[in-house]
Every structure is written in C-alpha cells, then in structure tokens.
Amino acid sequence: MIRLLLSDDHPVVRAGMRALLEAEPDLEVTGEAASAEEAVQLAAAPGIDLVLMDLQFPGSLQGVEATRRIRSLPDSPRVLVLTNYDTDADILGAIEAGASGYLLKDAPPGELVAAIRAAAAGESALAPAVASRLDESQRSADQRLTVREAEVLQLVAAGSTNREIGQALFLSEATVKSHLVHIFTKLGVGSRTAAVARARELGAIRAG
C-alpha cells in the first residue's frame, strides 16, 4: 500500500484527487495539507510514502522550499510535484529540491497514477512534456537561467526595484545587479523589459 499526503491549497482539488486515488487498490490518502508549512509538518509523521506537492501556496513558504525541507527529513517521504506551472525555473527548482517527479494537473488520471507508483518506488516520474522541456533546457545550458536568476527576473517582472529584490531574496544590491548582468548576457538583451519578455517567450519564468 502506498500512503499519500495531498498538499494543495484548494479543497476542491484535494477532494477530486482523493476520490481518484482512493479508487486504486494500492493507494491510500492518509492526510491533506492546505499550506506548504502544513505539508512539511505532516510529512514528518511516520507512515507517509509520497507527498503530492503543488508549487503555489498563500504565504511565504512555497512548494519548492517545502519539497527541500521534506526531503531533508530523516526517512523522508518522496515528493511528486503536481502543479499548473511548467516554466524551466519551476521544473529545475523542484528537481534540484529533491522531487522525484513533476506532473501537470491536466495529466490524464492513468498517467498520474502511474507516476505516483513510479515515484513511490524511487523512480523518476516526469511528464513527457516536462522531460522534453528539461532535456531542451540542458542542451541550451549557456542560455539557461539558474534558479536564483529566474527568481530575480520574476521579481523584475513584478515591478520590483533592485533594492526590493535584494530584500526579498536576502541579497545585496550589488549581487542583484550581478545577476541581472548575467541574465542580460544569457538572454542576449539589454534591458529589464526585454529580459522579461525574452524569458517568458522561452518559458524560463511564469507569464503574468
């Protein structure tokens, strides 16, 4: 029996997933978390094999950092990301944090169930589109933004100043400027606006 923790801030989504998964004889939903903090707390309890983790939550703690904290626990459960977001930064951030797999919420039920079984068994469980995106990103490593660079540029896209970005990410303004220089070079642009537009075009940061 694979024991699951559902982590999503939408009750309707959790209810739908529970109904789908508990129809499978080898899957059991043993808990639900409505926040990333709650997910980390519940994942520390014994008996959880796999956490289904969304990436976006209200509050400061988000899915990638929650995944990192869960995977650092003693005898930690595995984590399978299930989200609406498929930017390079989201995918790379989740994999670097220790997620065993990455699926989009519109994945067919059969694909989701197969991914859960694979992730619980310690295998990689990437949606085909995500795996393709990851391969493409790795092939163009000279243009690929690091997770930190993507975080900086996402805040630029939200209208933050260098000082505000530094405060949000605990960086000095000089470090923020250094990241922006690297971003401009990688993307072949000369301005913040052009960098945001190019990164969205490449799927490196979230649109809107």
Image: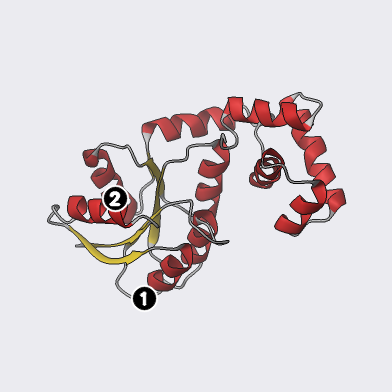
Q: Nearer the viewer, residue 159 or 94?
A: 159
Q: Is residue 30 above or below residue 107?
A: below
Label 2 element class: helix
Quadrant location of residue 140? Answer: top right
Left/right of residue 140 with respect to residue 53 in the rendered view? right
Give the percent coordinates (x, y) of residue 53: 40, 55
The spot of residue 146 in percent (x, y) is 66, 42
Which residue is located at x 49 percent, y 31 percent? 133
Picture quarter with the C terminus = top right
Q: Which mark is residue 127?
A: none
How packed is label 2: few (under 14 Cα within 10 Å), some, or many (20 or more)? many
Q: Which residue was labeled with disc 2?
A: 116
**Residue 198 visible from this viewpoint:** yes
Mark 2 and mark 1: span between their CA atoms?
19 Å
> Going by the image, does 140 lie left or right of 162?
left
Counting from the top left corner in percent of width and height, residue 62 is at 52, 57
Question: In the displayed structure, does residue 58 sit left or right of residue 33?
Answer: right
Q: At label 1, which amino acid type do we have?
A: Ala
The residue that label 1 is drawn on is: 45
Q: Quadrant of the N terminus?
A: bottom left
Total labels drawn: 2
- x 64%, y 30%: residue: 199
Disc 1 secondary structure class: loop
Q: Amino acid at mark 2?
A: Ile
